[in-house]
Image (cartoon, helix red, strand yellow):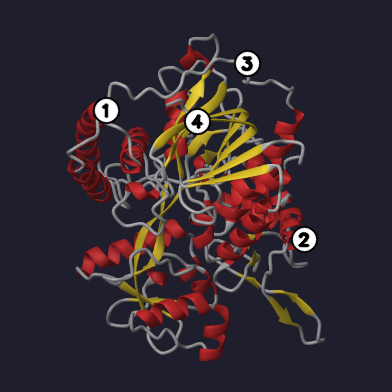
């Protein structure tokens, strides 16, 4: 049976804020494919609660937003990239509003309505525009609706990327990206997608950890595929652990937005004592790395399961109107946040590193772009400041659209790409290998490469990941692929990149804290890993 084949101008792998913004920003003359592993609205964007950081208030300024971002990034942000992003923040918010996103408003004393801005950790001003505590859902649903109305866009749901196709992989000179092999999860058949431009908007890789705030789709697929295709990756040691995820045996992965602390919520020990002032003068509004370290320290010091986040001193009406999603979800677990504190723990939340790109999202491989959390632009440095992530997604998607439009018309239509060959593989009768390796990977990454690291822990993790690489490579070569196998294969690559990066950093900076090197080095430098096939 022949391999199903599709041809487009632009192939976008990922359907979050970055991918959907790109699809809307590109010319209607382009034939576009948007791929999603689950439904088109599923992904980290949908679950983002806080909002979008932007300079919208007359008392705020671009320079202030820049300086706050640089301070949170612990010396590793690229100032030119930060300015590029912040200067475009107001324009992106205006575009979202024009597209139909309904941000919260409040009535002013003079009777007029203005957009409500909240404040989050690391920000010196209220500059986070939001839709209650479900901003990501509002943005995701709005953009998805607009994209679905575009006749030039084909949406493929339940399609998982297997690998990128470059010229050298089909026996030709060069390493330009000309397509991808994609697994149709409904039919369990691999299909061929050709395109002039391939864009990785696949999100982060927090699923490599045992506890994460991310949905199941966050398995680092784009980063792993780009590495195998010859792209450099940067700063993979900086994994942001969100300080406050709901601690409850039945809660799964439910994030408690930082906006709660922005509106006055206090972090408390089990005996009700506040503790953040002992760690930072900004208290609960310190950057996320500091708050996560403080919570981790207190949990280990006291041997307790969690700490508590309390906003019950605010009125019930205020809490229910500003945080309806959190109020409703906590109530399902018997926690009334209008009267009781919320049990919270840190959980893996955001991948600050990723595929090295320029300000247009272009990677080392011609024809291949990366935008959003999968990319490393230099914006976040050693610690992402709250609500800069959605901003990055949309600013760099718009920049990538402009860059793609300016490129000459080069087509992969005439290139003979071989179909996916599974003639030498069989169906597996030992899928238990996948589940066992999956659990082992996420456990040792949490134990050895988590919030606090040591050389010994990293060495243990490296030995284990090398064994898993051997097993999964053998398994991948002999059995038909599945989504679980693809994600495991990719997460093993991600784990190795994180461990390598963390081992190279001989200091503690931002999100990377090691007991063996607790001090800062005088010179702040990025950690750039180069694949063996890199020719740039």
> Of the residues under marks 2 and 3, which one precedes in the sequence?
2
Q: What percent of the width, then of the height, locates residue 415?
A: 58, 15
- Residue denoted by label 4: 4
**Figure check: 136 above or below 27:** below
**Figure check: 286 above or below 107:** above
**339 with respect to 436 (left or right):** right
Report, in whole angstroms, how far the alpha carbon at label 4 lies from the one at label 3.
17 Å
Q: For this rendering, which residue is in front, 305 or 408? A: 408
Report, in whole angstroms, how far the alpha carbon at label 2 lies from the one at label 4.
38 Å
Give the mark toward the camera: 2 or 3: 3
Dot 2: element: helix
- Residue denoted by label 1: 473
Report, in whole angstroms, how far the alpha carbon at label 1 lies from the one at label 3.
32 Å
> Of the residues under marks 1 and 4, which one precedes in the sequence?
4
> Of the residues under marks 4 and 3, which one precedes in the sequence?
4
Q: Are marks 2 and 4 in contact (CB under 8 Å)?
A: no
Report, in whole angstroms, how far the alpha carbon at label 1 lies from the one at label 4.
26 Å
The N terminus, quarter of image: top left
Q: Residues within 10 Å of mark 2 (few under 14, many from 20)?
A: few
Q: Residues within 10 Å of mark 3 (few under 14, many from 20)?
A: few
Dot 4: element: loop
- Residue denoted by label 3: 414
> Of the residues under marks 2 and 4, which one precedes in the sequence?
4
| Residue 78 figure quarter | top right
Tell me which residue sits at (54%, 61%) in the image. 122
**482 with respect to 290 (left or right):** left
> Of the residues under marks 1 and 3, which one precedes in the sequence?
3
Give the mark toward the camera: 4 or 3: 4
Q: For this rendering, which residue is in front, 66 or 105? A: 105
Mark number, residue 108: none
| Residue 388 figure quarter | bottom right
Dot 1: element: helix
């Amino acid at each position: 049976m022949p391999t199903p084949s599709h041809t487009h101008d632009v192939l976008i792998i990922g359907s979050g804020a970055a991918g959907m913004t790109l699809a809307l920003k590109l010319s209607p003359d382009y034939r576009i494919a948007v791929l999603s592993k689950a439904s088109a609205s599923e992904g980290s964007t949908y679950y983002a609660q806080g909002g979008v950081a932007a300079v919208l208030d007359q008392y705020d300024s671009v320079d202030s937003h820049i300086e706050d971002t640089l301070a949170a990034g612990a010396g590793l942000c690229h100032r030119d990239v930060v300015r590029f992003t912040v200067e475009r923040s107001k324009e992106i918010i205006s575009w979202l509003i024009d597209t139909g996103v309904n941000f919260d408003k409040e009535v002013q004393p003079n009777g007029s309505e203005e957009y409500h801005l909240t404040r989050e950790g690391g920000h010196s001003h209220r500059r986070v525009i939001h839709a209650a505590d479900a901003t990501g859902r509002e943005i995701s649903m709005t953009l998805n609706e607009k994209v679905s109305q575009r006749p030039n866009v084909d949406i493929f749901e339940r399609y998982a990327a297997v690998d990128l196709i470059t010229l050298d992989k089909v026996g030709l000179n060069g390493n330009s990206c000309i397509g991808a092999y994609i697994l149709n999860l409904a039919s369990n058949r691999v299909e061929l997608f050709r395109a002039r431009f391939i864009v990785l908007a696949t999100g982060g890789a927090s699923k490599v950890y045992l506890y994460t705030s991310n949905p199941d789709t966050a398995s680092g697929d784009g980063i792993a595929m780009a590495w195998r295709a010859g792209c450099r990756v940067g700063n993979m040691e900086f994994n942001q652990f969100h300080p406050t995820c709901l601690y409850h045996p039945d809660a799964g992965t439910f994030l408690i937005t930082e906006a709660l602390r922005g509106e006055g919520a206090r972090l408390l020990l089990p005996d009700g004592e506040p503790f953040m002032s002992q760690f930072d003068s900004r208290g609960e509004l310190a950057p996320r790395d500091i708050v996560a370290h403080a919570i981790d320290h207190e949990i280990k010091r006291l041997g307790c399961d969690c700490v508590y986040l309390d906003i019950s001193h605010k009125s019930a009406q205020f809490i229910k109107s500003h945080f309806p999603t959190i109020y409703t979800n906590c109530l399902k677990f018997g926690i009334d946040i209008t009267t009781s504190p919320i049990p919270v723990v840190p959980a893996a939340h955001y991948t600050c590193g990723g595929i090295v790109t320029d300000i247009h999202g272009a990677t080392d491989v011609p024809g291949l772009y990366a935008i959003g959390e999968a990319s490393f632009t230099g914006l976040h440095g050693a610690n992402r400041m709250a609500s800069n992530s959605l901003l990055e997604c949309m600013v760099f998607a718009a920049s990538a659209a402009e860059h793609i439009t300016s490129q000459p018309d080069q087509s992969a239509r005439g290139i003979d790409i071989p179909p996916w060959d599974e003639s030498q593989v069989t169906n597996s009768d030992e899928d238990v290998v996948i589940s066992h390796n999956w659990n082992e990977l996420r456990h040792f990454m949490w134990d050895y490469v988590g919030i606090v690291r040591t050389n010994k822990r990293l060495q243990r993790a490296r030995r284990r990941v090398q064994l898993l690489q051997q097993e999964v490579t053998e398994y991948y070569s002999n059995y038909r692929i599945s989504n679980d196998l693809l994600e495991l294969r990719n997460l093993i690559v991600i784990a190795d990149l994180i461990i390598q990066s963390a081992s190279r950093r001989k200091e503690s900076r931002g999100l990377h804290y090691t007991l063996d090197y607790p001090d800062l080095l005088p010179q702040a430098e990025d950690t750039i890993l180069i694949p063996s096939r890199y020719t740039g």
